Amino acid sequence: VKKFFPVKKGLLEFNKEQTFVQAVNDVSFSILKGETYGLVGESGCGKSTTGRTLLKLIEPTEGQAIYNGKDIFKLSGQELRKVRQDIQMVFQDPYSSLNPRKRIGKTLEEPLIIHNIGTPKERTEIVMEILSKVGLQLEHYYRYPHEFSGGQRQRIGLARALILNPKLLIMDEPVSALDVSIQSQILNLLKTIQADLDLSYLFISHDMSVVRHVSDRIGVMYLGKLVEEAPTDELFANPLHPYTQALLSAVPVPKSGEKKERIILKGELPSPMNPPSGCVFHTRCPFAMDRCKLEVPEKKAVASGHQIACHLYDE
Ligand code: SF4
Ligand code: MG
């Protein structure tokens, strides 16, 4: 039996000095227990906003985020705090949110104190256990944030996210600031921890190769819209949306002499304050037709688990 974390969202608008930005518009997806859902797209496409809105760190305009049968958007107070214990965020740079004058062990212990968990001795044990889970040594307990390398800091960020025993981690560009060799260490660690603790991940990144490495399924976003969703292998073998095709054409094929034709998109990414009518991709799409300027393409399934929003696939 699989447990579902369905997540549905509607139109979100943010009032910035009288201008409405359609950061995330009708994005809808679900995350299964134990899986990694990769959310990919260029910067500014709304993927970070999506992640933050799910936990009401940003107030949603409308829509739903169903977790364990409850709509997070309708929760407040104690109930919302409980959900924020179960669903933790991991950001690109954990360093900026670590208190520079506190030993790491003490920083990691804080959430346990806030939630009234354990005796001081038990809390120290929990922290030590988490430190070893993320590949740090016990002596790191007594060190200060500046004494750690970038990769180690991300391990600390992970430790902090894991300390309250969550079910789902929302990770926003968790390895983007790291060197490639460190990236793969962290990605492998994420996989180990996921299997170990039966965690679900929402993995947000602009980097297709990274997302491919960790994700079971992938959602591709463009200008606030989810334009395609498919299991990872299916998406890479058979990308259907013209935007996905362009994104993938820029990803080097590992261990193959095969040369791919890189698809260069014309024009600039339009402003989310004034998104194009109809299909938001029509100003840059090599296959745009007249109707694309007028009609918003509906998301539809073209194969099992493979959904796409593009008029090319209309009957
Ligand atoms: Fe291109 Fe039209 Fe498909 Fe949009 S709906 S991706 S403009 S073909
Ligand atoms: Mg972002």
Image (cartoon, rainbow, N blue to C red):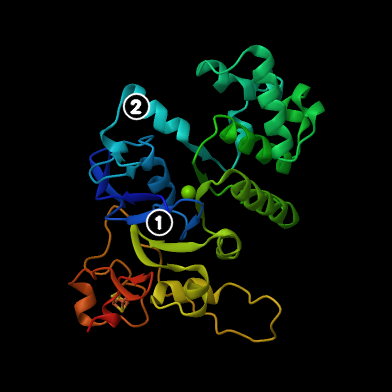
- Dividing the image into 4 quarters, which one contains the C terminus? bottom left
Q: Does any atom of ligand 2 lie closer than 8 Å to the CB of label 2?
A: no
Q: Pointer 1: what residue?
A: 45
Task: Provide the residue designation for mark 2.
Answer: 79
Q: Quadrant of residue 293?
A: bottom left
Which of the two labelled residues, at mark 2 and mark 1, occupies the earlier sequence position?
1
Nearer to me, 287 or 181? 181
Residue at horizontal 34 percent and vertical 27 percent from the top: 79
Residue visible at 25% across and 34% down in the picture: 74
Q: Nearer the viewer, residue 14 or 148?
A: 148
Q: Is residue 187 above or below residue 82?
A: below
Where does the image place residue 83, in percent across and percent down from the top left? 40, 33
Q: From what the image shows, is residue 110 above or below residue 215? A: above
Q: Quadrant of the N terminus?
A: bottom left
Ligand 1's quadrant = bottom left
Q: Is residue 177 visible?
A: no
**Quarter of the image holding residue 162?**
top right
Asked whether mark 1 lies closer than 8 Å to ligand 2, one says no
Look at the picture and state if 198 lies above or below 235: above
Q: Residue at x 27, y 46 (%)?
A: 12
Three-letter residue code for mark 1: Cys
Q: Is residue 302 left or right of residue 126?
A: left
Q: Position of residue 213 (x, y in %)?
A: 61, 63
- Kind of residue sitting beneath label 2: Glu
The residue shown at (38%, 62%) is 222
